Structures are given as structure tokens and as C-alpha cells.
Image: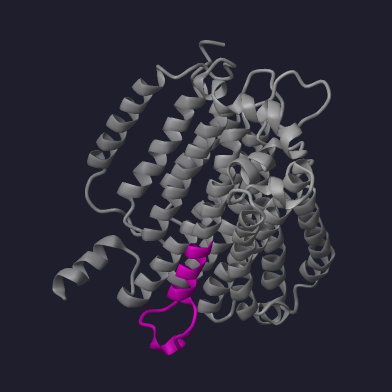
Amino acid sequence: MSALGLYNYEIVIVLMMTGFYVVIRSPNLVKKIVGLNIFQTSVFILYISMGKVADGTAPIVMEGARAYSNPLPHVLILTAIVVGVATTALGLALVVRIREAYGSVDEEAIQKQDRVG
Amino acid sequence: MLLGFLVVIALAVVRLRNLFAAVMLTGIYSLHAALLFISLDAVDVAFTEAAVGAGISTVLMLATLGLVGREESRPRGRGWLPLTVVLVTGGALVFATLDMPRFGDPNAPVHTHVAPRYIQDSPNETGVPNMVTSVLASYRGYDTLGETVVILTAGIGVLLLLGGRRRDNDEDEGPR
Amino acid sequence: MSHHIVLRVVAKLLIPLILLFALYVQFHGDFGPGGGFQAGVIFAAALILYALVFGLDSARRVISPDLLRVLMASGVLLYGGVGVASLLLGGHFLDYSVLASDPVAGQHLGILLVELGVGITVTSTMLSLFYGFAGRGGDG
């Protein structure tokens, strides 16, 4: 157990850094939002992993359950997912408007236009 | 096992230049995350993740791609600077996890403060067997009210940005 | 879209089931997994499926964007209204115990109403997000 004890957290960090890499490396604004989504999901997995109790069951009262997993992280992440999709949509809406104003969603093309204008 | 799949999918998203395929892969990524949540006892979260991640956010991303084009240009410059930043940050975070309590440890600090009270008292105090629901709506009602307002605000923002005045197609510069 | 007959038939079969399941998730959320957020997104997903298969215009006829705007706000108002009601009945803001004679019944009622408010807001916001994006493209 102790050797595998941190496996979840390490994977979360790998996923988080993958998303982070996409955000800072990709010139495309839509791809950046995809990267942010990967990052966001890795944070969800981090929280849910923390809430897990060994031998526990889902936090719904029932007969014969010895231990329940922690309901608090579930609540936080449940709302975070729905808020996350709403904010993602806001970001995508901004991308659509940027595309209409500049004719491109490529970061460098946009910066070039800004320098000229 | 599922976590390994998640890493593979995330890396594939990094490599893909075709945004359409990348968005479809994020949908699959979300479904995998939902499966993972089920195995970690978070059934409510898995529900939401499956419906939101694989359903709604994928559809919204595809709709955006239809508006802005689906190919990504090759990034200019060398990739070593972002890669270094990412590796250093990741290294620091890995170092930080060494102090984390082990996975599934019932004595971790997360499980010793408010959670036992919720688990013991919520069925008697609220008469609701699903603790996620009772904590969400009752004990943390203020938080949830705030979250709902955030969703409303984001919706209003999108409507302000995209709703209302619709442009004619020939007014747009560039092909759609 | 008119030639996708398999899609249309399957969608017609599935959409009522998805809507029913969403209602089940909404109102059974106290006992099993479920609640306002989950039910809201499932409900919205069913209507988005309808819009994708049958076209945006027919979806707009089913639920108009103006109605959605009203619903978005009224969900939050219902949530806040429950809080104010408990305030007027002598409790704290969002303290549901005073809503009924029995504290446990009051909690139950409060949770049900609040989840309903969340569900309404989430459904209508998700749908109007979709309308916003799809309406921009012109064809949906």
C-alpha cells in the first residue's frame, strides 16, 4: 500500500502538467482551453482521491456499511464541474468574438495585428 | 489502470494538431475520469462528469470549432522553455506530494474534521440518506447558492457576448 | 438533416427516456445519487440532443430563448426565496428547519426546493449556452 500510496497523486501531477504545457505552448486559443480542461479534471481527480477511504463505500446511508468515503470533496467537485463548464463556455465565447474581431484564433497572428494597429 | 489511460489520452491531445480529434479525445478523457470517480466512490460526481464532460462541454467545443476553424498551426520557436517550466513546476509538486497522507488512509486530516460530523448526524438531522445532497443543499447551502449565481453570471456573460445581434455571413472576414 | 432517419428514430426513442431519467435524478436525489446539478445537465443534454437531430429552429420552438432567460433567473430566485422564507419564519438564512413544524421535514422540504432551483438554473443556463453558440453559426 505504501509503495502505491502516492500513485494517484503522481498521476494527477502528470496530467496537470500536461494541461499546463498545452496552455503555455499551444498558439491556438481553443487548444489552450482544451488544456485548461485537462488541468481542471486533474484537480477534480486530486480532490476525489483525497476523499477516498480504504474499504469505504459511496456516502449514501445503507445497512452494513462500515465506512463511508468523505462526502465533502464530492460536494465541492460536483459544483466545480458544473461551474467549470459554464466558465469554459464563457472562454469559448470570448474566443469566438476574438475570431470575429481579428479573423484568427492564433495567438501570434493576433499579437502581430495588435502591434501594427 | 484507468489513470494510465488518462495519461495516454492527455499526451495524445498534446500531440494532435487536428482540433476536432483533440476535442473528441477530451470527451473520451472525461468518460474515463467518470469511470475513475465511480471506482473512487464518488457516484454523484461521476454522473455529473459524464453528462457535462462527455456531453455538454464537447458539444460546446465542437460548436466553437465550427465557428473558428479546426486546424492548429505549428507552434513557432523551440519547445524547451515551456518544457523546462513544466518540468520544474511538476518536480516541485511531486516533492510536495511526498508529505501527503497515503491514498485511502482513514486517519488523513481530510477525514478527521467536519466530515465525521456530516456522516454521523446528517441522516438524523435532515432525513436525507444521500450525504452529498444534504451537505450540498443544507450544510453548505451558502456555497451552493454562490455556485448557482456563478453559473447564472457565466450564462449572462455568454449571452452578452454571443446572443442578440446576429452578424450576416458575408460581413465576416475569412471563410468559416 | 432530414435524411438521417435512423438518427431521428433513435433520438425520438431516447429523448423521453433521458428526460424521465433526469426527473428521476432530480427528485430521487435525496435517496440515491443525484440532485439538482446532475439532473440539470442531463435534462439539458436531452434537449441539446433534440436540437442537434431536429435542428435548432424546432428546438427554439419547443423552448424559446426568452423563456430560458426567465428560467435562469427564476431558479436562483427560488433558491434565494427559500432562504428569505426561512428568514421570515424566524430562522437563519437558508435554515430549513423552520419551514415545517418538524425540523427534519423542514430540512427535507428545503433541500427539495433548493435542488429544484439549482436544477432549473443549470438546465436553462446550459441550454442557452448551447443556443448562443449554435445560433452564431447560423445552421446549428
**Side of B36 where C106 appears, left or right:** right
Residue at 19%, 70% (x, y): give it: A114
Asked whether A70 falls inside the magenta stretch, the response is no
Asked whether B171 falls inside the magenta stretch, the response is yes
Foreground: B57 or C20? Answer: C20
Q: Where's residue C127, x and y in %?
A: 62, 68
Residue A63's quadrant in the figure? top right
Residue furthest toward the left?
A116
Q: Where's residue B150, x and y in %?
A: 49, 58
Residue furthest toward the front?
C90
Residue at 47%, 49% (x, y): give it: A37
Segment tinted magenta in the rendering:
B152-176
**Side of C80 where C136 appears, left or right:** left
Residue furthest toward the top?
A2
Foreground: B71 or A44? Answer: A44
Residue at 75%, 32% (x, y): give it: B124
Number of marks in the rendered image: 0
Residue at 67%, 28% (x, y): give it: B119
Q: Where's residue A108, x and y in %?
A: 25, 62
The C terminus of chain B - image quarter: bottom left
The colour mode here is one colour
**Side of C88 where B8 appears, left or right:** left
* Looking at the image, residue C79 lies above or below residue B176: above
Residue A64 appears in the rendering: yes
The N terminus of chain B - image quarter: top right
Q: Where's residue B152, x and y in %?
A: 53, 63
Foreground: C23 or C109? Answer: C109
Residue B12 appears in the rendering: no
